[in-house]
Amino acid sequence: MRLFYQQKTIGKKSRKLQKIPFTIEGHVYTLKDLLTQLVTQEVQNYNEKALDTPLHIYITDQQLEEAVQHGKVHFGEKKNASVQSIDQAISTVLQAFEDELFLVLHNEEQLNSLTTPLTIQEDDVFTFIKLTMLAGRIW
């Protein structure tokens, strides 16, 4: 079944949310099941990209000239090429939801519990909103 997700970080200037398609396999009964499948797919995609990085990265004179014009010279390598643990990522996202570090909306309706039953249809949209903690002093 094809679904969409979109992300929003409060405080970012981008007003438009881009819908990103993803597919789920099998049955999804709760928000916990949905988050588990989504995180599993994202971590697998991340780990595959880490393995596809070439061993010898070089830069041509033309690329160097263009990079100097932009003010940043880099080789395009990832800073962290380690393979991530799917179980650890799932544990982290579930804990973050329980700690209310992000909100989940299912077609404009907020989901408040990991165990709430979901009724999902083709092309439904899930929105993830990362909450930012405010800090400051009172004088």
Image: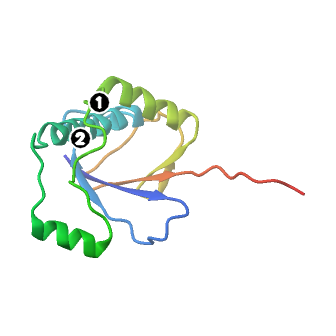
In this rendering, position of residue 114 left or right of residue 75: right
Can you identify the residue that label 1 sits on?
A: 84
User: Residue at coordinates 9% horizontally, 62% vertically from top-left?
Assistant: 60
Question: Label 2's element?
Answer: helix
Residues at circles 2 and 1 in contact by the CB criterion of under 8 Å? yes
Question: Neighbour class for label 1 at 10 Å: few (<14), some, many (≥20)?
Answer: some
Which is nearer the N-term, disc 2 or disc 1?
2
Circle number at residue 2: none
- Which x, y percent locates residue 70? 29, 73
Q: Nearer the viewer, residue 99 or 74?
A: 74
Quadrant including the C terminus: bottom right
Q: Amino acid at mark 2?
A: Tyr
Question: Where is 90 relative to 2, above or below?
Answer: above
User: Residue at coordinates 51% horizontally, 36% vertically from top-left?
Assistant: 96
Q: Nearer the viewer, residue 115 or 104?
A: 104
Question: Where is 88 relative to 37, above or below?
Answer: above
Can you identify the residue that label 2 sits on?
A: 46
In this rendering, position of residue 118 left or right of residue 47: right
Q: Amino acid at mark 1?
A: Gln
Question: Label 1's element?
Answer: loop
